[in-house]
Amino acid sequence: MAKIIHAADLHLEDGEQLPYCYGVLDEIIALCQAEKPDALVLAGDMFDSFADFEALRSEFCARFAPLAAAGCKIIYIPGNHEGRGASVDLTAYNMDPLVFAAARPFTLIEAGELEFLCIPHAASYEDYRDWNVPAKKQGVTRVAVAHALNSTIYTGPDEETDAQAGVMDDDIFSRFQVDYAALGHVHAGRQQALGGAVACYPGSARVWRAHAREAGPRRVCVVRTGSQLDVHTLELKNAGLYKEYRLPLDLQGAMDQGAGERVAAAAGRQDLLKVILAGVVEDENAAKATAEALREKLGSVARRAEVRLETVVAADLSSHTLTKAFLEELDKLEPEDAQGADYRRWLLARQYGLEALAERLTEAK
Ligand SMILES: [Mn+2]
């Protein structure tokens, strides 16, 4: 029986997000100190770029010293991000007390009843049939550590259009007798049987960017070997959550104050929020002011808040024949008392009508 903790895609980034990133790293280390696994495997993209790797690696390594001293083996392979902008071969770096398995195409590390087949990220793995991977020893659990896409476990598009990952065939796992594939790259967590192995993407260890695939708790995988492989996940609280909202703007470019309060009240200190304010507005500048006020409010309660406008200016619509006719007819019905309930209803009717027309016009484009 052995226990392994598997994490990936922390994307340590120098700059204002660094304290947040270190908060998550420290939580992973603390979790390992509590769980006492035989090994911690880091499946790539622990740094956001080669520049971050260079700037932060000594601090990164130093933080693992107590865990290594407690007897936990720490294995780390580079992902596609460590190599971004790299001018040198990553194998030149010493990452003590971590075992940095950067040599291509693979390194096999034997550790008692565990074997680690470490496969650093590569643009292609097509030559895998030529790799001289020794046969698995009897009674040993083989863990592949890789940073790649696999089209069986993850059918969506590559999350990164500018830094795509190499694609790994299922056959790699069966050919090399892998029991557990500790994968990195896909930021949404996944688990699936693959070529005889249990393959997992734990998902990004932190919320890297405002994207739906970063939604939900960030996690690490805890793997127990034995007669049967057992995998469960643990949440990383310091990572916070990614939350996305779409809120309506009225014609005046204002939003329902209650809605903004509710988003703020639900926000956690480490959350990344994205709010889209949408609607047909008379004046886009008023909408911009609303967005700025909301950004400020949310920025004070969450780690980061992105507020975007998706507005259509009513004037753009009014040149259109159908809209012109709609507004002409509606203006005839304008209630005299601008404070009354009838007036509010009339304004809403005008807004909804314009929104429906705006939708038709964008469809027609
Ligand atoms: Mn990646």
Image (cartoon, grey):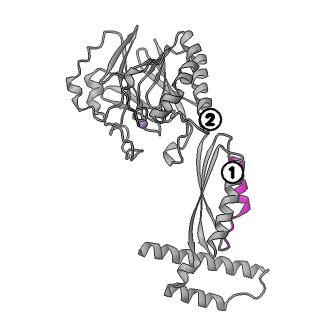
Q: Is residue 331 above or below residue 258?
A: below
At numbered mark 1, what does the secondary structure look like: helix, strand or loop?
helix
- The answer to whether residue 28 is magenta is no
**Residue 43 placement, left or right of 67:** left
How packed mark 1 is, by other alpha carbons closer than 10 Å (few <14, some 14-19, many 20 or more), is many
Residue 53, position as x, y percentages in the image: 48, 29
Q: Quadrant of residue 251?
A: bottom right
Q: Outermost residue toward the left? A: 130
Q: Is residue 123 left or right of residue 163?
A: left
| Residue labelled with disc 1 | 298
Report the residue that reaches farthest toward the top: 112
Q: State whether label 2 is within 8 Å of ligand 1.
A: no
Relative to 115, residue 361 above or below: below
Q: What amino acid is found at the position of numbered circle 1 in the picture?
A: Leu
Identify the residue under disc 2: 20
Residue 350 vs residue 275, the one in the foreground = 275
Locate residue 120: give its quadrant.
Answer: top left
Magenta-colored span: 251-266
* Label 2, residues with CA under 10 Å away: few <14, some 14-19, many ≥20: some
